[in-house]
Amino acid sequence: MDLRLLQFCVNSCKDQGQRFLLLNYGEAKSLLREAIQLVEQGLVMEGGGSPDAAIALHHQALLQHQLLSPITEPSYDWQEMDIRSRLGRAYVATGRISEARRQFQAVLDVHRARADRAERAERAAATQVLTDGGAR
């Protein structure tokens, strides 16, 4: 997929406050596979002394990832944290510390949001058990 088209799709979804919900499993699987390949290519570039190329590949991987749905992809948050961590390290390698800091902060934010969702789900499940138990 062309990077400009991919960026447009992601931005237009964000502008509308929505995410793409990929209804086609094959398409979602393909996007995930492409994102993983981009991350792997970025690692090769970074290891080969080309952190700027790695940054471009990690950005493209992040765009691919953002087209997936966190509802249908159970490891969505972990994948985002991984990509952003790698992107942050590539920024550090180029001396772009403020960009690196933003990526590392985004990792912490995603992790915190994931933990908050898990806590809310546990509370909701406990409330449901108490409600169901009291109704009998």
Image: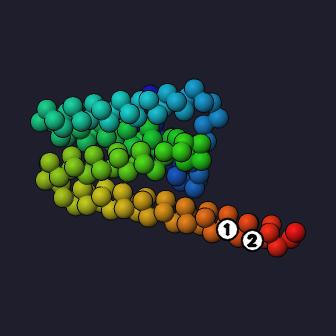
Q: Which image quadrant: the C terminus? A: bottom right
Q: Are marks 2 and 1 in contact (CB under 8 Å)?
A: yes
Residue closer to the observer: 47 or 1:
47
SS category of the residue bearing label 2: helix
Looking at the picture, how far across and down is residue 19, in whole percent?
57, 48
Q: Is residue 52 visible?
A: yes
- Residue type at mark 1? Ala
Q: Residue at x 25, y 42 (%)?
A: 55
Give the residue displayed 38% in from the left and 51% down from the top.
81
Residue under label 1, please give it. 126
> Is the residue 87 above or below the residue 123 in the image?
above
Give residue 25's position: percent from left, percent from top. 60, 30
Percent of width and height locating residue 77: 46, 50
> Camera-side residue: 77 or 20?
77
Q: Mark 2 to mark 1: distance in Å?
A: 6 Å
- The residue that label 2 is drawn on is 130
For residue 89, side relative to residue 26 (left or right): left
Q: Nearer the viewer, residue 23 or 133?
A: 133
Query: Dividing the picture into quarters, in which one does residue 109 lie?
Result: bottom left
At 62% across and 30% down in the image, what residue appears?
A: 24
Q: How is the image coloured?
A: rainbow
Q: Residues within 10 Å of mark 2 (few under 14, many from 20)?
A: few
Give above or below for 34 relative to 122: above
Residue 3 shows up from this direction: no
Residue 48 appears at what percent x and percent y? 13, 32
Q: Secondary structure at mark 1?
A: helix
- Residue most extreme to the right: 136
